[in-house]
Image (cartoon, rainbow, N blue to C red):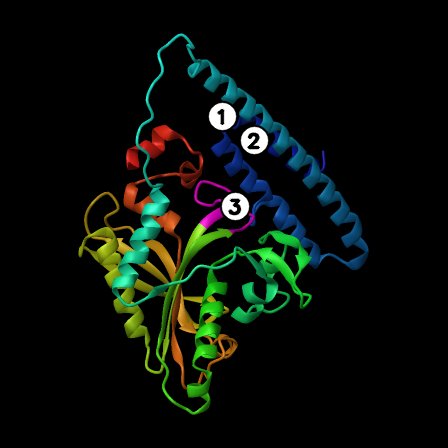
Amino acid sequence: MNDLESLVQAAVADFGAAPNPAELENAKARYLGKSGRVTELLKGLAALPPEQKKTRGAEINQAKVRIETELGAARERLAEAELAVQLRAEALDVTLPGRGRSVGGLHPVSRVIERIEQIFGSMGFDVAEGPEIETDWMSFTALNNPENHPARSMQDTFYVDLKDSEGRWLNLRPHTSPMQVRYARAHAAKHAADLAAGKTIPEIRVVAPGRTYRVDSDATHSPMFHQCEGLWIGENVSFKDLKFVFSEFIRQFFETDDFDVRFRPSFFPFTEPSAEIDIAFRSGPLAGRWLEVAGSGQVHPNVVRNFGLDPERHIGFAFGMGPDRLAMLRYGVPDLRLFFDNDLRFLSQFR
């Protein structure tokens, strides 16, 4: 038995042993995820001689198709079993008297987004909303992502088989960052005369919450999720302002002063320098654990230019965070997918 056949058999065994959909998706990630075994084999093709790449690549792709087929069959099996259990547990007695409808309530993620908007609104930030189908230029090029950036591939981004009037491909936005570009360009256009005259214009302070889309699905990732981007641009805005703003946001959001904030060096194409923002609570069930809650950084000069502003005069910071993850932390929810299962037994707890 060759290595690929062994890999397929191992995947079949793992898929067959998965007791529930969550475990099945975790098993899928071990083989077909971004760091999965099949993905690593495909990456290894680069090291092979040219005459071997085609044959080896075809063999790996055949194994991948077999694994995906087995994954689909396992999903159907678990879905059918889950449905059978649900039908047995939720059998209806149509002779029972009717029941009145209870009062509904906001979804927990909607609650968190409203809370984010209120907190940043109290600090002078506007709230911006925009299209969920964006141009390739807005999603990537304007944010200093080169044309060969991997996030543009079908593995990371949902593309729409259409182009805009300028011939640019459309996609379901992978982040709400395009709203930073749209808002800043509108702001620059509104104050174009003052900019041309060298006058100081009002600062840009905006948060952009909304739905975003990426090809990803496990206990902490969903193909559709929520993101909130923030932007503050002016003539004298620094990392000190970023630290104050975000620390104040965390204090108000979690209603505690009992935490520490850490800015950990990182890399994002649209900011330089860049930092991940971690928090650690000093007490409670999460005490002592550093939790990543946002990415941030000083807006890259190329992005400032795409805003229609002069990076020699205008400087500032941007940050991005996931309301879904903040909701998990605030409400102690262990699995992101619970937010999207529409199970009233779960959702009714937040009424």
Provide the residue designation for mark 3.
223
Camera-nearest residue between 262 and 205: 205
Mark with earlier residue (3, 1):
1
Of badges 3 and 2, nearer the viewer stands 3
Residue 261 visible in the shown view: no
Vertical side of 185 occupied by 91: above or below: above
Of badges 2 and 1, nearer the viewer stands 1
Badge 1 element: loop
Vertical side of 163 occupied by 65: above or below: above
Provide the residue designation for mark 2.
14
> Dot 3 surroundings within 10 Å: few (below 14), some, or many (20 or more)?
some
Q: Is residue 48 magenta?
A: no
> In which quadrant is the N terminus drawn?
top right
> Dot 2 surroundings within 10 Å: few (below 14), some, or many (20 or more)?
many
Residue 45 percent location from the top left of the image:
70, 54
Camera-nearest residue between 200 and 274: 200
For the magenta stretch, what is the residue range?
A: 213-225
Provide the residue designation for mark 1.
19
Residue 161 visible in the shown view: yes
Label disc, if present, on residue 347 of the rendered structure:
none
Q: Quadrant of residue 321?
A: bottom left
> Dot 1 surroundings within 10 Å: few (below 14), some, or many (20 or more)?
few
Specify the amino acid type for callout 3: Pro
